[in-house]
Image: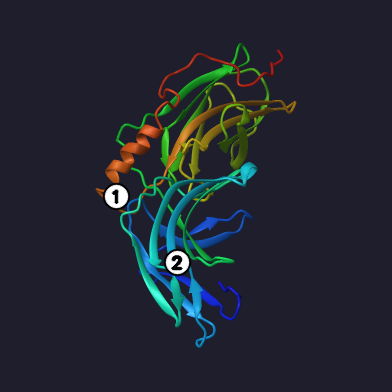
Amino acid sequence: MSFFGFGQSVEVEIVLNDAESRKRAEHKTEDGKKEKYFLFYDGETVSGKVSLALKHPNKRLEHQGIKIEFIGQIELYYDRGNHHEFVSLVKDLARPGEITQSQAFDFEFTHVEKPYESYTGQNVKLRYFLRATISRRLNDVVKEMDIVVHTLSTYPELNSSIKMEVGIEDCLHIEFEYNKSKYHLKDVIVGKIYFLLVRIKIKHMEIDIIKRETTGTGPNVYHENDTIAKYEIMDGAPVRGESIPIRLFLAGYELTPTMRDINKKFSVRYYLNLVLIDEEERRYFKQQEVVLWRKGDIVRKSMSHQAAIASQRFEGTTALGEVRTPSQLSDNNCRQ
């Protein structure tokens, strides 16, 4: 980044110490494009150099101090003027003075807490970045570098299946079951749908994965639903006693872990939406929340504390494994 002032300009560059070996991860930007950023996890040290290259070697650069910050912040798109910082660390690199030649400053943020996953959504963005600042009387020289943070979780062996009976009285009665209630992002959803009573002419059935982003609090709550996937499980009329298998691979879809009440600013939840369409184009549906989590390639002992915190965040989900009494899938009534 260049600053053109009176007589001198400078290029500022932030370089990580492990830039050559550190893994990069794709992350969606606000305009929907995907870019690769250096990938970090909670508790990892962030270190490197801030390099200053003077454009004119024979001229000096006066400054009021040089610093670097590590920042984690949440930006709500409807309130762009306010950035809510949940991590803010500062290292002073140089006292006020002048620079007469190009030079580099080392920095290190040790075992940085990064409690949340990087996220770019419809109405909110959570980002982590390094920001180097050369303070000047007129205009500061600022250089930022974004990184991506992934949160890894481990879960106890108890992972109850979801089993429910739903229907419309004297018209439709089905039982559906999913093998688990919590899935990692590369998992496979396995289940089945069993028709106990069919008195309406169903022509199509599908399962949708719906992401629900919730921002704001109180009266200023915004819900944004996004259908991530549509998976056809039946084309044609089912008969009583028929069983339809479900096998849905999650790896092919753009999913994030479930996020609940992140810094009291936003949540991201996922739902499996069972949709039935009859011959008169009436739609019947039933939603069930599932928890998604990110599994690391190698489960480290240091992740146990983070996993415990993550498990606590997911408390309060709908009771799983219970068979409910038949209820309407929608407000539509079937005809005899």
For the C terminus, the image quarter is top right
The spot of residue 66 in percent (x, y) is: 44, 67
- The residue lying toward the viewer, choosing from 116 and 209, is 116
Q: Residue at x 24, y 48 (%)?
A: 301
Q: Is residue 162 visible?
A: yes
When the figure is inspected, residue 115 is found, relative to residue 167, above or below; the finding is below
Q: Earlier in the sequence, mark 2 or mark 1?
A: 2
Toward the viewer: 287 or 258? Answer: 258
Task: Name the secondary structure under disc 1.
Answer: loop
Which residue is the site of mark 2? 65
Residue 32 placement: quadrant: bottom right
- Estimate the x, y position of residue 269 in percent, counting from the top left: 51, 36
Q: Nearer the viewer, residue 234 or 267?
A: 267
What secondary structure is marked by label 2? loop
Please count the marks in the image: 2
* In the image, residue 38 above or below residue 206: below
Q: Report the residue at 57% width, 36% height from top.
A: 215
Q: Amino acid at mark 1?
A: Val
Mark 1 is surrounded, within 10 Å at the Cα level, by few (under 14), some (14 to 19) or many (20 or more) other residues, namely few
Query: x and y percent of residue 130 in the render?
Result: 46, 60
Any part of residue 22 in sight: no
Q: Residue at x 42, y 59 (%)?
A: 39
Q: Is residue 272 above or below residue 36?
A: above
- Residue flagged by tag 2: what amino acid is it? Gly
Hey, which quadrant is residue 99 in on the image? bottom left
The circle on residue 299 is 1
For the residues labelled 2 and 1, the Cα–Cα distance comes to 42 Å
Q: In this rendering, which labeled residue sits more in front, label 2 or label 1?
A: 2
